[in-house]
Structures are given as structure tokens and as C-alpha cells.
Image (cartoon, rainbow, N blue to C red):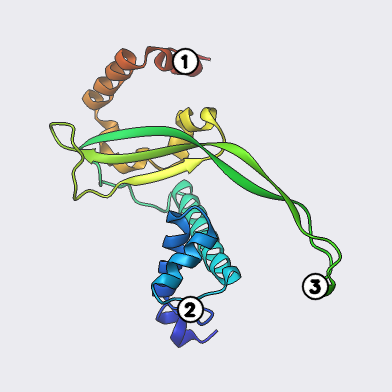
Amino acid sequence: MCPELAALGIQEAKTAALVDRVARQSALLPSFEHAQGELKSHGLSLPLKEVHRIASRLGAQVLTRRKRDLEDYRGGRVPVGEELKGKRVACCIDAGKSRLRRVTRKQKGKGKNKKQRRRYKADWRDVKLLIIYEIDKSGAKVRTSRPWIDGTFAGPDEAFYSHSATELGYTHLIGSSKRNAQISARLERRVQREYPECYERVIKSAAS
């Protein structure tokens, strides 16, 4: 790979703009076939395998970057964030279902002489989605704010486990506000009032 081209964001003969467009269409549309058709309607004709390859490679790079950032945070190499300090924020959790493709038999042979077709199963999995964003005094979302979005396939226990939020660094965003006794007491009273079952469960877990 040419270092000069890499400095410009060009990797494997693909510009950053091309990867961005292919990845966006692949994420927004229900299948790679639909993404390929939408790209073709805008004058970008790519083979289906190439669309899949570009989107999958970028997804792997994003996950690698996410893992590296988490390791830096857990290792104490990330400074305390102040993005949400002193601000009103909303935290929303939603659930849905997604199908994950799992290969059960790999293809044998290549080209026209291949002996067996690839087999796979697409199991339905529950996914929990989390979004954190800033709100104003009336409770409306601040349009200029940048939301934090994440998700997990690990189930509700993982999504609602407070230690997970700490490990992922979400509580890191409010910075020194975590050390404010008044803010902590106000949050505790609100959770106790609005989510009594979760509050009791956390208290029992902390006492054990």
C-alpha cells in the first residue's frame, strides 16, 4: 500500500468518499442488493461482492477502533470527559430483533466445478439499543448536540447492568459531576421514584 495514498484516505484503490457512500447505503437499506441498486442509480456501478466487501471491512475497522478506545479508557489513558457536565441529558433504551447470519457449511471447490453450496442459518437475535442525548428545559432534544448511540446482542441483563455502562465509559462523559453529592442524591431519588424495582435490585446487589 502506498503511504502517500493512505495519508489521503485511499486504501486498496478506494477513496474515503467511496467507502463512506457504500457503507451508508448498506447500513440504511435492508440488503446489499438494495444498496447496490441505489448506488447504481447514482452512477456508481459496483459488483455485489464488492459492496459487501467494502461495508464489511469498514464495519470491522470501526469495531477495532471501538475496542481500542475501550482499552484506552479502562487503562486510564483517556481524560475525563466534560461533554455532558452540567447539562440535562436523556437516556433511552429500545429493543428490537435482528437476524445474524451463521455459516453451517462452507463451500467446497471454486468456480463452476464447486461441489457444494455454502449453507447458513439466519437466527433471530434480540438487540438492545441505547441513545444518550442533550435536552433543553422543556425536555426537547437540543438540535446542535451530538447523540451517543450503542447496542448489544448480549440481552437485557447486559444492557441494564450498571457495571457495563461504567466499563463502556458512558459515566465518563459527565466528568466531575459524578463527584457532586447533590447531583448524585437527586439522581438516586429520581431512580427510586420512577424505577422502584430497578432501584431495589441495585440496592440489594450493592449490599451483597
Please state which of the two labelled residues, at mark 3 or mark 2, is closer to the viewer.
3
**Sooner in the amino-acid sequence: mark 1 or mark 3:** 3
Q: Secondary structure at mark 1?
A: helix
Q: Which mark is residue 14?
A: 2
User: Disc 1 marks which amino acid?
Assistant: Arg
Disc 3 to disc 2: CB gap under 8 Å = no
Of 175 and 38, which appears nearest the observer? 38
Q: Using residue 106 as the reference point, say whether residue 63 is left or right of it.
A: left
Which corner quadrant of the image does residue 114 belong to? bottom right
Q: Which residue lies at the image location 46% right of the left edge and 63% below the top edge? A: 23
Mark 1 Cα within 10 Å, few/some/many (few <14, many 20+)? Answer: few
Which corner quadrant of the image does residue 165 belong to? top left
User: Disc 3 marks which amino acid?
Assistant: Lys
Q: Is residue 183 above or below residue 37?
A: above
**Sooner in the amino-acid sequence: mark 2 or mark 1:** 2
Mark 2 Cα within 10 Å, few/some/many (few <14, many 20+)? Answer: few
Whole-percent x and y of residue 198?
42, 17
Residue carrying label 1: 201
Q: Which residue lies at the image location 48% right of the left edge and 32% below the top edge? A: 159
Task: Work out how far the residue at label 2 is from the one at label 1, CA to CA, in angstroms.
Answer: 51 Å
Q: Secondary structure at mark 3?
A: loop
Whole-percent x and y of residue 12?
54, 80
Residue 72 visible: yes
Residue carrying label 3: 110
